[in-house]
Amino acid sequence: QPTKKIADAKLAKDFQAVLKEFQKAQRLAVEREAAYAPFITQAGLPQSYNSTEMNNGADKLAEQRTQLLESRRQELVFLDNEIVFNEAIIEERDQGIQEIQHQITEVNEIFKDLAVLVHDQGAMIDDIDTHIDNSVAATSQAKGQLSKAAKTQKSNSSLICLLMVIFGVVLLIVIIVLAA
């Protein structure tokens, strides 16, 4: 779901920006605390503080430093996780882009094959058109030849009849002459 991934990425960036601002503020606070701590020890504590209270203060300071180190360690772990997450998103997007590029290449090949087929079919259509024109011309010539053949056949049958009649008359004359 691309929209969810984009929203997640935006939230991650926003969170990272806020985290950086928090880290800056935290560093500033640590620097100020470190700068302030020597003044307390140099100026000395009032006489009312006893050694137990100083030890408690030192323990609290050590505890704060431990907590600070732990929070920094957690921040580093979080940042490492964030980097891994961002790298995974980048890898996924790269794979998506490569897949799209592969599909575009396939579509390009399909269109090239289609263009070749269209060109070949265009040549076939031209051949078919030429054959149709030749068939029309041959059909009209054949029609003319058929009408000539029909006329010739009619005239030949009339001629044969006429020749038979003439032969019959000649035969009759020869029979009459021989009989006489």
Image (tube, rainbow, N blue to C red):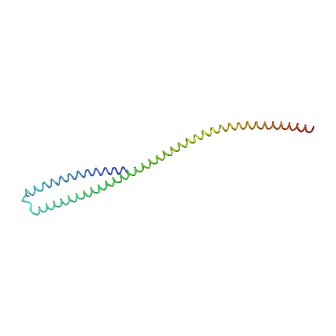
Q: Which of 149 and 17 is in front in this view?
A: 149
- Could you tell me residue 170's position as x and y percent? 86, 37
- Could you tell me residue 138's position as x and y percent? 64, 39
- Could you tell me residue 80's position as x and y percent? 27, 57
Compared to residue 168, the image places residue 100 above or below, namely: below
Q: Nearer the viewer, residue 101 or 159?
A: 159
Compared to residue 155, the image places residue 55 above or below, namely: below
- Could you tell me residue 155's position as x and y percent? 76, 36
Q: Nearer the viewer, residue 34 or 154?
A: 154
Image-based side of 4 in relation to 56, left or right: right
Quarter of the image that includes the C terminus: top right
The image quarter containing residue 82 is: bottom left
Residue farthest along the left direction in this orientation: 47
Q: Nearer the viewer, residue 28 or 95?
A: 95
Image-based side of 68 in relation to 176, left or right: left
Question: Count the marks: how many?
Answer: 0
